Image: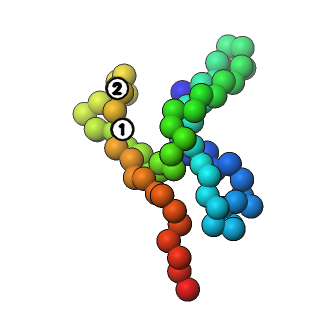
Amino acid sequence: ILVGTNVISLENLLSRRVRSSLDKVIINMRTGKVSRKTLSPRCLDLGSINPNYAGKRNKYAYMSVMEEIPRTS
């Protein structure tokens, strides 16, 4: 199981119209089947969990929320 940010389109990223989602990807190693489920439509990134729960089932993650790309010059 892999959980990560999915940037929908590189063109959107380059034109500052970021649309991303937090997706859960499950890969069945026996059948090779891949399934994807959107966990959040918000732009979430840099996720981490409590290190005491590493390798164990957990349901909480700490993530940053990005509403829009800051403008730089």
Q: Is residue 28 above or below residue 8?
A: above
Q: Among all residues in the image, which is located at the extreme left?
A: 52
Q: Which residue is mark 1?
A: 61
Q: Kindly indicate the quadrant of the structure image that contains residue 23.
A: top right
- The picture places residue 41, in percent across and down from the top left corner, at 54, 41
Q: Among all residues in the image, which is located at the extreme bottom?
A: 73
Gap between marks 1 and 2, in whole Å? 8 Å
- The picture places residue 48, in percent across and down from the top left corner, at 37, 44
Quick one: 24 or 12, which is closer to the camera? 12
| Relative to 66, 61 lies left or right | left
Q: Among all residues in the image, which is located at the extreme top?
A: 30
Q: Is residue 40 above or below residue 30?
A: below
| Relative to 49, 6 lies left or right | right
Contact between labelled residues 2 and 1, with CB atoms less than 8 Å apart: yes
Quick one: 44 or 67, which is closer to the camera? 67
Residue drawn at the location 72% of the way across and 53% of the way down: 9
Residue drawn at the location 28% of the way across and 38% of the way down: 50
